[in-house]
Image (cartoon, rainbow, N blue to C red):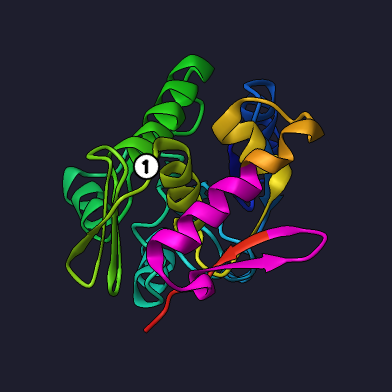
């Protein structure tokens, strides 16, 4: 299950898109303004955003520029939703600003889901996270801190990558269990604690992954 944010000022279209994604097993939040979307992203970064290009308060290009200015791209993919076929030059403009893909409104739901799954797969399996002194390459199964290799087993590495892909956001133990162990059974919570302990020990500083008591964990970049 991924956490998705649908941004569209067309209430009906937003509802249709959200329902398609929910039926595919995702947790979906819907907002109808670009400014509200930016507020939510700053508070709790999603795994993926579906963004209508033609919003009344800010257009898609402006939203992408703001996300890049704040350093939030390419930590999560943004799929641009458009009601009309843009010229190739317009598509290039959006892609150059950090969009992962374009989707035409009314696209067959199977195509929409395929695009979303591909973007999520690319994010979680192929993306190299560069967070100052720390570099996390999930596909290459490597972590470096200040240029030195940090040895982590698979589960702690995946937990670190998931936390670091949403810096500053609180990620619950239940979400980590579901995403990395494929279960929400509370009896497995010790596995999450062990993974976090391994991360802190490997990085040599517990400040990278903070415990938010009663909620989960938060990644905090150390300078």
**Residue at (58% x, 34% y) in the render:** 179
**Residue at (83% x, 60% y) in the render:** 214
* Percent x, y of residue 210: 61, 69
* Percent x, y of residue 186: 80, 35
On the picture, is 137 further left or further right than 170? left
On the picture, is 20 further left or further right than 186? left
The stretch of residues the image draws in magenta is 192-216
**Residue at (51% x, 59% y) in the render:** 166
Q: Which residue is mark 1?
A: 123
Of residues 204 and 47, the one drawn nearer to the viewer in this rendering:
204
**Residue at (77% x, 58% y) in the render:** 215
Residue 113 visible, this orientation: yes
Magenta segment's dominant SS is: helix
Query: Where, quadrant-wise, is the N terminus in this rendering?
Result: top right
Task: For mark 1, give the secondary structure.
Answer: helix
Tell me if residue 182 is in the magenta stretch.
no
Of residues 207 and 71, the one drawn nearer to the viewer in this rendering:
207
Query: Where, quadrant-wise, is the C terminus in this rendering?
Result: bottom left
Q: Residues within 10 Å of mark 1 (few under 14, many from 20)?
A: many
Of residues 99 and 162, the one drawn nearer to the viewer in this rendering:
162
* Percent x, y of residue 84: 39, 39
* Quadrant in which residue 12 is drawn: top right
Residue 107 vs 178, above or below: the answer is above
Residue 54 vs 14, above or below: the answer is below
* Percent x, y of residue 40: 64, 65
On the picture, is 62 further left or further right than 16? left
Residue 11 visible, this orientation: no
Tell me if residue 199 is in the magenta stretch.
yes
């Amino acid at each position: 299950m991924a956490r998705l944010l649908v941004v569209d000022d067309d209430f009906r279209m937003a509802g249709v898109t959200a329902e398609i994604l929910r039926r595919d097993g995702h947790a979906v939040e819907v907002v109808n303004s670009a400014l509200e979307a930016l507020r939510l992203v700053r508070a709790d970064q999603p795994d993926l955003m579906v963004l209508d290009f033609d919003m009344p308060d800010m257009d898609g290009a402006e939203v992408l520029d703001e996300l890049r200015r704040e350093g939030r791209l390419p930590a999560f993919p943004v799929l641009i939703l458009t009601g009309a076929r843009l010229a190739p030059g317009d598509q290039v403009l959006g892609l150059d600003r950090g969009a992962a893909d374009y989707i035409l409104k009314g696209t067959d739901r199977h195509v929409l889901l395929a695009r979303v799954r591909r973007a999520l797969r690319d994010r979680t399996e192929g993306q190299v996270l560069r967070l100052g002194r720390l570099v996390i390459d999930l596909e290459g199964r490597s972590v470096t801190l200040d240029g030195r290799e940090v040895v982590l087993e698979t589960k702690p590495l995946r937990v670190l990558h998931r936390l670091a892909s949403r810096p500053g956001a609180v990620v619950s133990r239940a979400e980590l269990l579901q995403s990395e162990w494929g279960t929400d059974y509370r009896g497995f919570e010790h596995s999450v604690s062990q993974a976090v302990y391994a991360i802190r020990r490997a990085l040599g500083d517990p400040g990278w992954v903070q415990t938010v008591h009663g909620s989960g964990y938060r990644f905090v970049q150390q300078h």
